[in-house]
Amino acid sequence: MTGERVLVVEDNDRNLKLVRAVLEHAGFDVSSAGTAEEALDIAVERTPDLILMDLQLPGMDGFAGLAALRTQPATLAVPVVALTALAMPHDRERVRMAGFDGYLEKPISVRDLPSQVHAAITRGRRSS
Ligand code: MN
């Protein structure tokens, strides 16, 4: 699992540093953004293999960020996995219904994150 390009969108600096360190250690090519607005520009430039999108962001939130990614031809097909501190079944359903290609609950598992990300890339975009 080397060289796969992951864009991490996370406004919490500590979380971002952790996710970045874990993924880089596992061989992923990681870029990052602190806002969804910034992520849109980077995603169009780099067309990552996967975007990890925090839901609670300043300005445009993760749901709006996903919707915006889906309107751009360059990023339409990029799988987007939600990073969420929300854990209620209702919230998980909202994430699924919004069209995310999966979700990972925070705090992330340092041990499992690389294989979770690799699996999401392999799975690609949800077909439904
Ligand atoms: Mn956040």
Image (cartoon, rainbow, N blue to C red):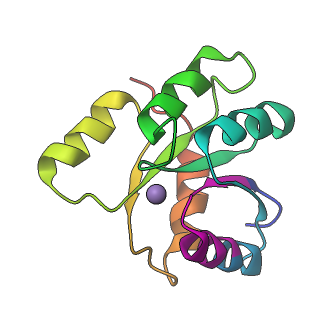
User: Residue 17 colored magenta?
Assistant: yes
Is residue 79 visible to the viewer in this orientation of the structure? yes
- Residue 106 vertical position relative to residue 79 in the rendered view, above or below: below
| Residue in the foreground of this view, choosing between 24 and 31 | 31
Instruction: Provide the residue span drawn in magenta.
Output: 6-20
- Residue 23 vertical position relative to residue 76 in the rendered view, above or below: below
Q: Residue 25, located in which quarter of the rendered image?
A: bottom right
Provide residue 109's location: percent of width, then percent of height: 44, 79
Is residue 100 visible to the viewer in this orientation of the structure? no
Number of numbered tags placed on the structure image: 0
Q: Residue 100, located in which quarter of the rendered image?
A: top left
- Residue 115 vertical position relative to residue 100 in the rendered view, above or below: below
| Residue in the foreground of this view, choosing between 74 and 124 | 74
Q: Is residue 35 left or right of residue 24?
A: left
Provide residue 52's location: percent of width, then percent of height: 56, 52
| Residue in the foreground of this view, choosing between 89 and 14 | 14
User: Residue 19 colored magenta?
Assistant: yes
- Residue 113 vertical position relative to residue 38 in the rendered view, above or below: below
The N terminus: image quadrant: bottom right
Residue drawn at the location 53% of the way across and 33% of the way down: 65
Provide residue 31's location: percent of width, then percent of height: 77, 57
Provide residue 35's location: percent of width, then percent of height: 61, 46
Residue drawn at the location 31% of the way across and 37% of the way down: 96
Residue drawn at the location 65% of the way across and 79% of the way down: 22
